[in-house]
Image (cartoon, rainbow, N blue to C red):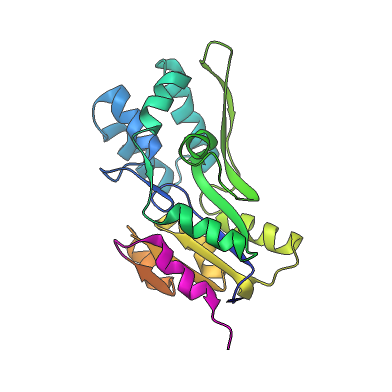
Amino acid sequence: MRRKFDLVCFDLDGTLIADDNGLVIWERILMRIYGNLDVSNQRYKDYKSGKFSFEEWVNIDLSDWKNNAITKEVLIEEIKTLKLNPGAKELVFDLKNEGFKLAVISGSIDFVLEIIFPDHPFEDVFINKIYFDDKGNISHWHASEYGDKGKADALMLIAKRENIPLEKVAYVGDHANDVSAAKIAGFSFGYNSKSAELDSIVDVNIKDVDMREIYSYLVEKDD
């Protein structure tokens, strides 16, 4: 096999991992607190309208979690309802074995990746970080600079550091917040995409299949 690309960047929520109801961890926790998604949906609308920044949105949500006793134990309980998408683990390890550099660029939280995919092979992980005290309560957090439109910046940062031209970078995502990175990658995938905008710009849309299908687009057989 010969690599067509050198770096593959993945979104996390909805791409590598999924919830049977299509919810991400932010929605699951706010659903647990409020009993519905009204608060979550309103905050998303406020963010998209420019009422607050991505960092402020993270701070609002995590402050809410902390104030409503969302402990490490509660988070583990909710996160364990998530699962890797079919073929995700096999795909990333196959790519690792072929010598690809791998990264996650996500608006999720690091604890999700730690619980669902603790043995992951990603060399770079751009994600929100959450910290707990010795009693398991949320103590503080760090909002990623790269959770939404900044995903393109993270992709370019890795490519520049590794001296990889953008045409040798592939990106895999599922939603509107993946558009910025998908636009600049040399090749992009929508995996079970929930965004018409993402659908319109990616090179390949993959629906309801094993993620290992992506592999065939990233390598070519030796003659």
Percent across and percent down for residue 39 are 31, 32
Q: Is residue 70 left or right of residue 109?
A: left
Give the residues drawn in magenta, as a range: 207-223
| Left or right of 185 in this view: 32 | left
**Quadrant of the image for the N terminus?**
bottom right
Query: Most extreme residue toward the top, as rendered?
Result: 135
- Residue sitting at the far bottom: 223
Query: What x and y, as percent, mark residue 22?
Result: 29, 46
Residue at 32% across / 57% down in the picture?
194
Quarter of the view holding residue 42: top left
Residue that appears at 42% across and 47% down: 13
Residue 53 showing in the rendered view: no
Q: Answer yes or no: is residue 200 visible.
A: yes
Where's the C terminus, which quadrant? bottom right
Residue at point 51%, 15% (across, down): 137
Q: Position of residue 7 (x, y in %)?
A: 62, 64
Residue 149 against residue 61 in the figure, above or below: below
State the residue at coordinates (33%, 34%): 81
Query: In terms of image quadrants, where is residue 191?
Result: bottom left
Q: Is residue 53 magenta?
A: no
Residue 165 or residue 197, whichever sits in front? 165
